[in-house]
Image (cartoon, rainbow, N blue to C red):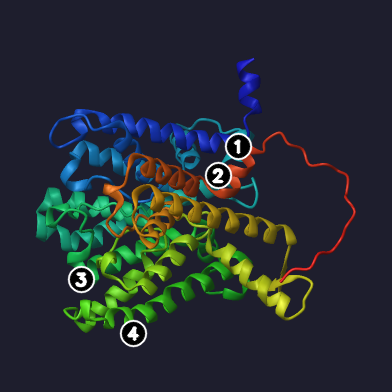
């Protein structure tokens, strides 16, 4: 009977249960006295919040990571970040590959669902590529960061800082160990340092592009016209989402009086960094609480969009945004189908995109409104926090640690939903509901 029930569990349900198991395990480990620097037990809800934030690669924290957690606690957080960035199923398959255990069709199917792969065929080779690419990029990031951190902090501490921040950046987590410079200070002290901010930006973008895009680029090199449609859409959308906000931040935000102390070099780096980090990374090189309301709104939009499918990033994804824009273009041009780069996109892709976008928007607004009502914070601050959670970003205007337990639970649920994914959650909940083969009569309604 037990094995029959296991076979009845769908891949989507396996994914959400896998994340839940890792989160709870991490929370238990973080509760232990060995995990905190003062050697005392940490309250379960705070540990659950931290474990969820790490596993869902978000970066929102109720304790400063450096000042509260011991080396053991920081190591647990880093392990949760790595598992969350790769995905629970990818990690499990990696262990199976390492131990040379035979991987059956069911495991391959679950893996396909986990990383949104287009087909089951070649899924093991794709997993191997993901693991190798992750290791190489995180290693390169750590090596470059070590150029700055080793002379600054010494060998042992500098090496740990290099590894921790490289993994955190590539996995788009946003956890940092800069609390010794001031609690919750993130990378503010490195605002004008191109080694640190440049490396972090590269790792964030690399992790957010998606492994399918990297694999496609690796195989086809500079033959851009042969790229898959998804690769073309992801690269173009990502480029525009990096360029346009950076221009805005440079010419408007960082020309405000509160940033008068920044040099031109620092303004350029800060503008670039603030256009990259809301894409689900969570690091910040300036204080977001000092930003203009328009900059906060742009950051919220970037947080909700996030990265690309099959990546370490969250959000409703760049491809969903592209689908919505292409749909608007098709209506303006009075075309019956959605088209892009000489290809016609199936209607079911748009349906999925609209569903995901609507879910994220509803949960983001609902969560932010409830937090604002419960804790009495401004609606803009609450919405920023809500967008940061559901987009698995980790940026904050400084209110996270002061929120009530109920608001923390809301943020935990938003982070969990944002990492598991909208479609995965829908498929898990609606498992067993077979679509009816009958077609209802069609009738048009007026919209707009």
Q: CA distance from mark 4 to mark 3?
A: 20 Å
Q: Quadrant of the C terminus?
A: bottom right
Say whether disc 1 or disc 2 marks the residue closer to the N-terminus: 1
Q: CA distance from mark 1 to mark 2?
A: 8 Å
Say whether disc 1 or disc 3 marks the residue closer to the N-terminus: 1
| Residue denoted by label 4 | 251
Q: CA distance from mark 1 to mark 3?
A: 44 Å
| Residue denoted by label 2 | 114
Q: Are marks 4 and 3 in contact (CB under 8 Å)?
A: no
Q: Which of the two residues, 236 or 244, is positioned nearer the viewer here?
A: 244
Q: Position of residue 59 (x, y in %)?
A: 33, 51
For the image, the number of numbered tags is 4
Q: Residue at x 29, y 51 (%)?
A: 175
Q: CA distance from mark 4 to mark 1?
A: 47 Å
Q: Residue at x 47, y 54 (%)?
A: 314
Q: Are marks 1 and 2 in contact (CB under 8 Å)?
A: yes
Q: Which of the two residues, 355 or 153, is positioned nearer the viewer here?
A: 355
The relative height of residue 390 versus residue 74 in the rendered view (above or below) is: below
Q: Position of residue 96 (x, y in %)?
A: 48, 34
| Residue denoted by label 3 | 193
Disc 2 packing (10 Å; few <14; some 14–19; many ≥20): many
Say whether disc 4 or disc 1 marks the residue closer to the N-terminus: 1
Say whether disc 4 or disc 3 marks the residue closer to the N-terminus: 3
Q: Are marks 2 and 4 in contact (CB under 8 Å)?
A: no
Pick out the residue farthest to the right: 441
Q: Mark number for residue 11?
A: 1
Disc 1 packing (10 Å; few <14; some 14–19; many ≥20): many
Q: Which of the two residues, 374 or 364, is positioned nearer the viewer here?
A: 374
Instruction: Name the quadrant containing residue 368.
Output: bottom left
Tell me the SS state at disc 2: helix
């Amino acid at each position: 009977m037990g094995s029959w029930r296991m076979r009845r569990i769908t891949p989507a349900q396996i994914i959400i249960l896998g994340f839940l198991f890792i989160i709870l395990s991490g929370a238990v480990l973080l509760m232990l006295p060995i995990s905190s620097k003062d050697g005392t037990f940490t309250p379960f809800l705070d540990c659950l919040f931290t474990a969820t934030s790490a596993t869902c690669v978000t970066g929102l924290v109720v304790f400063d990571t450096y000042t509260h957690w011991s080396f053991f606690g920081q190591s647990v957080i880093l392990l949760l970040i790595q598992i969350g960035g790769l995905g629970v199923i990818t990690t499990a398959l990696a262990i199976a590959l390492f131990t040379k255990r035979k991987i059956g069709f069911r495991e391959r199917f679950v893996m396909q669902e986990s990383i949104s792969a287009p087909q089951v065929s070649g899924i093991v080779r794709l997993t191997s590529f993901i693991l190798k690419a992750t290791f190489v990029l995180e290693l390169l990031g750590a090596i470059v960061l070590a150029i700055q951190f080793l002379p600054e902090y010494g060998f042992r501490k500098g090496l740990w800082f290099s590894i921790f921040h490289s993994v955190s950046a590539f996995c788009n987590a946003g956890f940092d160990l800069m609390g010794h410079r001031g609690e919750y200070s993130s990378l503010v002290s490195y605002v004008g340092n191109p080694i640190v901010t440049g490396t972090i930006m590269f790792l964030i973008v690399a992790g957010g592009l998606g492994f399918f895009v990297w694999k496609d680029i690796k195989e086809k090199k500079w033959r851009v016209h042969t790229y898959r449609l998804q690769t073309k859409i992801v690269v173009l959308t990502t480029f525009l989402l990096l360029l346009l906000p950076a221009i805005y931040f440079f010419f408007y935000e960082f020309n405000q009086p509160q940033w008068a102390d920044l040099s031109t070099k620092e303004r350029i780096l800060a503008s670039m960094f603030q256009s990259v980090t809301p894409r689900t990374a969570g690091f910040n090189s300036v204080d977001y609480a000092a930003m203009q309301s328009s900059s906060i709104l742009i950051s919220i939009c970037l947080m909700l969009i996030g990265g690309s499918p099959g990546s370490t990033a969250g959000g409703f994804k760049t491809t969903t945004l592209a689908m919505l824009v292409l749909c608007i273009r098709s209506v303006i041009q009075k075309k019956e189908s959605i088209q892009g780069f000489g290809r016609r996109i199936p209607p079911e892709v748009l349906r999925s995109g609209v569903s995901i976008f609507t879910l994220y928007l509803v949960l983001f607004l609902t969560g932010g409104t409830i937090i604002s009502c419960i804790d009495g914070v401004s609606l803009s601050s609450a919405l920023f926090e809500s967008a940061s959670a559901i987009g698995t970003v980790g940026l904050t205007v400084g209110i996270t640690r002061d929120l009530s337990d109920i608001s923390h639970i809301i943020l935990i649920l938003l982070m969990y939903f944002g990492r598991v994914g909208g479609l995965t959650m829908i498929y898990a909940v609606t498992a067993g509901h077979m679509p009816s083969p009958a077609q209802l009569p069609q009738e048009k309604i007026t919209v707009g």
